[in-house]
């Protein structure tokens, strides 16, 4: 269900917004099956992390990483970036670069879709770009049980479960709040795997994609070949939120997400907006602490790298010290030789001085002069 009356447009951006490990790749692949152009700069698959592909535009990811870095954050930061001035002059070059990037993508078909789990917190940035370009924007928000995301991030990145749970909350609430009043549909990962055709039909309806597309070979391939149980490594029941009792905000946000993903609630009605705002206000109560925590976490994430660089520096210093000692051992005998040579030269120089002095004394005598003349004649 969409927040606004869906309509096809000649120039439109479709954004997949969702938490890391929440099924954004599967949703993006589903959009591709529906005929949404994802471009030709997609990130390569990774056998360990995402064997079937990330479906992320590498230039979009690079752009998002750059903006996050400029804001003192990264993909693992729990900071919701609520205090950012998205119109600040410092972000001007990034806005321009993003616009040029999208213009290149739109030049091919007039519409473009992209997915990047970094996007939910950066939606205010991208929406300013969309507005300046005059393009319509629509959203597919991917959701997954928070505990499944926590498990996945622990396995892939070794993240602390509490950190991952806060990341899930921040990403979901940013995605829901920043897309208010815009065309959007919420898609649950487990539902997509269980009933891919039904979920693609929901997406198509929200995005005003013709029903005929649902009968295409691409959709059949997605539903029958791409989607499989092999994509699911953790699954929790919809109401299984007991482990989240220490973070009731996550449990409540999950309940709302499931109602939206099952069409029990309309993402565009006033009740949904009110619930999202209430959850957002609860998140904002933690915003200063989350901003501080994000910076501390980012500094802590640097410790292993800095420790590695320190170990390398120590090894390099030890190697240089050994080389210096070997060089000194090699130079020492030569120093002795040079000192002996200098001593010999100094002795010879002294002997020459003495000889010159003696010749001068001889030259002062008559006999000496005669002898010298004789010597001269013989020359």
Image (spheres, rainbow, N blue to C red):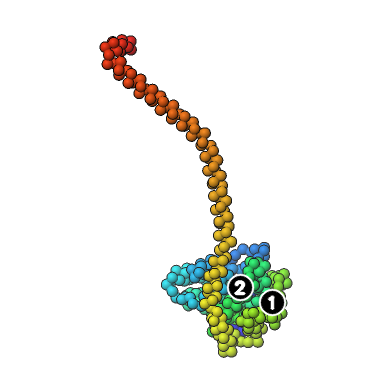
Q: Quadrant of the N terminus?
A: bottom right
Who is closer to the viewer here, 53 or 79?
79
Query: What's the residue at 59%, 68% (across, down)?
Result: 56
Q: Quadrant of the C terminus?
A: top left
Q: Residue furthest right?
A: 229
Q: Relative to 356, is 15 on the left or the right?
A: right
User: Is residue 355 positioned above or below 43 on the image?
Assistant: above
Can residue 266 be seen by looking at this rendering? yes
Query: What's the residue at 55%, 71% (across, down)?
Result: 294
The earlier-in-sequence mark between 2 and 1 is 2
Who is closer to the viewer here, 214 or 377?
377
Q: Quadrant of residue 304?
A: bottom right
Residue 155 x, y percent position in the rendering? 67, 67
Q: Which mark is residue 73?
A: none
Residue 222 x, y percent position in the rendering? 68, 72
Query: What's the residue at 48%, 68% (across, down)?
Result: 70
Whole-angstrom CA distance, mark 2 to mark 1, is: 23 Å
Q: Which mark is residue 163?
A: 2
Residue 124 x, y percent position in the rendering? 50, 77
Q: Which mark is residue 190?
A: 1
Which secondary structure lies at badge 2? helix
Q: Are marks 2 and 1 in contact (CB under 8 Å)?
A: no
- Crowdedness of circle 1 by 10 Å Cα count: few (<14), some, many (20+)? many
Who is closer to the viewer here, 284 or 42?
284
Residue 127 x, y percent position in the rendering? 50, 77
């Amino acid at each position: 269900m969409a927040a606004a009356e869906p309509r096809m447009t000649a120039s439109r951006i479709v954004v997949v917004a969702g938490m890391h490990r929440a099924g954004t790749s599967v949703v993006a692949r589903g959009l591709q099956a529906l005929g949404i152009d994802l471009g030709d700069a997609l990130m390569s698959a990774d056998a360990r992390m995402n064997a079937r592909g990330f479906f992320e535009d590498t230039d979009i990811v690079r752009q998002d990483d750059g903006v996050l870095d400029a804001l003192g954050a990264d993909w693992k930061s729990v900071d919701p970036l609520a205090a950012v001035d998205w119109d600040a002059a410092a972000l001007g070059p990034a806005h321009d670069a993003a616009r040029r990037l999208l213009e290149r993508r739109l030049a091919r078909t007039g519409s473009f879709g992209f997915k990047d789990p970094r996007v939910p917190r950066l939606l205010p940035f991208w929406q300013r770009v969309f507005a300046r370009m005059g393009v319509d924007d629509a959203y597919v928000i991917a959701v997954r049980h928070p505990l499944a995301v926590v498990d996945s991030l622990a396995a892939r990145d070794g993240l602390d479960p509490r950190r991952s749970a806060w990341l899930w909350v921040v990403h979901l609430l940013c995605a829901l709040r920043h897309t208010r009043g815009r065309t959007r549909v919420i898609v649950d990962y487990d539902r997509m795997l269980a009933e891919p055709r039904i979920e693609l039909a929901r997406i198509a309806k929200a995005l005003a994609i013709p029903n005929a597309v649902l009968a295409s070979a691409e959709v059949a391939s997605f539903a029958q070949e791409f989607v499989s149980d092999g994509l699911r490594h953790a699954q929790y029941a919809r109401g299984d939120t007991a482990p989240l009792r220490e973070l009731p905000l996550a449990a409540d946000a999950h309940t709302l997400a499931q109602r939206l993903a099952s069409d029990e609630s309309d993402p565009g009605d006033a009740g949904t907006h009110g619930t999202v705002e209430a959850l957002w206000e609860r998140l904002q109560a933690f915003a200063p602490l989350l901003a501080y925590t994000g910076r501390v976490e980012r500094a802590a994430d640097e410790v292993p790298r800095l420790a590695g660089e320190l170990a390398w520096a120590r090894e390099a210093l030890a190697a240089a010290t050994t080389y210096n000692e070997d060089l000194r051992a090699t130079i020492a005998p030569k120093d002795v030789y040079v000192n002996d040579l200098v001593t010999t030269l100094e002795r010879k120089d002294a002997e020459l001085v003495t000889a010159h002095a003696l010749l001068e004394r001889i030259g002062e005598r008559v006999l000496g002069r005669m002898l010298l003349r004789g010597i001269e004649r013989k020359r």
